[in-house]
Amino acid sequence: MAVRPMLRFPATRVPGGFHRRAVTVGVTLLAASGFATLGSAGTVSGTAGAAAPPFLSRFTSVTTVASTVPANGDVNPYGIVSVPMSTGNLVAGDTLVSNFNARSNLQGTGTTIVEISPSGTQTVFAHLHRSQLPGPCPGGLGLTTALTVLGNGYVVVGSLPVPDAGMGTPGAGCLIVVNPDGQPVETWTSNQINGPWDLALVQSGSTDELFVTNVLNKTVAAAGQPVNAGTVVRLDVSVPNGKPPTVFSSTTVAQGFTEQLNSSALVLGPTGDAVNHAGTLYVADTINNRIAVIPDATTRTTPMRGGGYTLSYGGSLNAPLGMALAPNGDILTVNGGDGNAVETTPLGKQVDTVEIDPLNAGGDLFGLIVAPNNNGVLFVDDGDNTLKLFGPA
């Protein structure tokens, strides 16, 4: 296949004094042999007594894995999750990606989840149709960044739909449960699920916890003005083997995040979230350029108000959207306002900033995950509708 010339971007200084490293950007597909293995170590060892270097500092190049556009023409990839086990049509090590827009490129109309192998082979895992959903989903279908694989192999995807072929008022949406063969089996709706924008998963035996960010509370009525009503809801889910999961309780664990309807992004608000082993929840507060933290999220029974504590603000954060936890416990975010990935420690220090999608390259960043075997960061680029890997040279 043809290989375009590599582009190199000089290192610069960014606001807050954090160093942005040069990254080699390519457009070739990954080799058929798949991801190289770096080992299972969660941290990078250094000299005795020295702090380990940032996780992102291991990696230097961006490579296109595959297009995320399926045969029906859906675009605007948002959600991303690695498949942890082989079951049904799911293959361990593959990546699932959800599309937010239909071929028309109108927001909140996408209906597909594609599955991409490490070698770049793309198939359609699920093509959902509103008329075939097994339960209600107020407003219809528009698949968001909220995407995960539960402990029993069922997939959960969020829908924040815009009816009337993308010209209507955004609907509250729902969470859709899809079996391992790609067929919808349940929808989850409640007065706490209102514009599910992203989610994080915590597994614990036969019970999973989902932390769902919601961005439509009072935003439609505010007619484009910002409101402090965004929430994160914890869903406690039973995940029996071979059977559909069921929600047995739901708790709002945080509220008061700023959210706002937006002409280009449809809506802005709390987006990516992640939970560490201690039960601490981190949330990307897009509008306020900060990372919020909510302690004891896995056991909390009442919501933390005011959008939680601020862990890190400003600096290299520029409308942070997607979020993931690095193996060393640091928080990884990607910006909607530029093409940078940012690594922040649990103490709030921004320790690395990397330009993985150059300005004027036509791209925007949304979902990201740590690649299998800790071999970099996989992310979706909704500017050119691709899955990319930021990994070793």
Image (cartoon, rainbow, N blue to C red):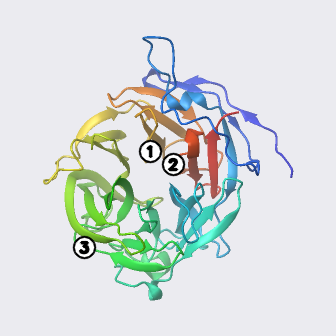
The residue tagged with tag 2: helix, strand or loop? Answer: strand
Residue placed furthest toward the right: 2
The residue tagged with tag 3: helix, strand or loop? Answer: loop
Q: Are marks 2 and 1 in contact (CB under 8 Å)?
A: yes
Sooner in the amino-acid sequence: mark 2 or mark 3: 3
Local crowd size for mark 1, using a 10 Å CA cut-off: few (<14), some (14–19), many (≥20): many
Amino acid type at circle 3 is Ser
Residue placed furthest toward the bottom: 131
| Residue 27 image offset from top left, x and y in percent | 74, 47
Q: CA distance from mark 3 to mark 1?
A: 26 Å
Q: CA distance from mark 2 to mark 1?
A: 7 Å
Q: Which residue is mark 1?
A: 324
Q: Residue at x 37, y 53 (%)?
A: 200
Q: Is residue 97 visible?
A: yes
Pick the quarter of the image with the C terminus: top right
Residue placed furthest toward the top: 48
Q: Are marks 3 and 1 in contact (CB under 8 Å)?
A: no
Local crowd size for mark 2, using a 10 Å CA cut-off: few (<14), some (14–19), many (≥20): many
Residue 146 found in image quarter: bottom left
The residue tagged with tag 1: helix, strand or loop? Answer: strand
| Residue 368 image offset from top left, x and y in percent | 51, 48
Q: Residue at x 24, y 64 (%)?
A: 218
Vertical position of residue 244 compared to residue 307: above or below: below
Q: Which residue is mark 2?
A: 368
Q: Which residue is mark 3?
A: 190
Side of 304 relative to 259 (left or right) = left
Amino acid type at circle 1 is Ala
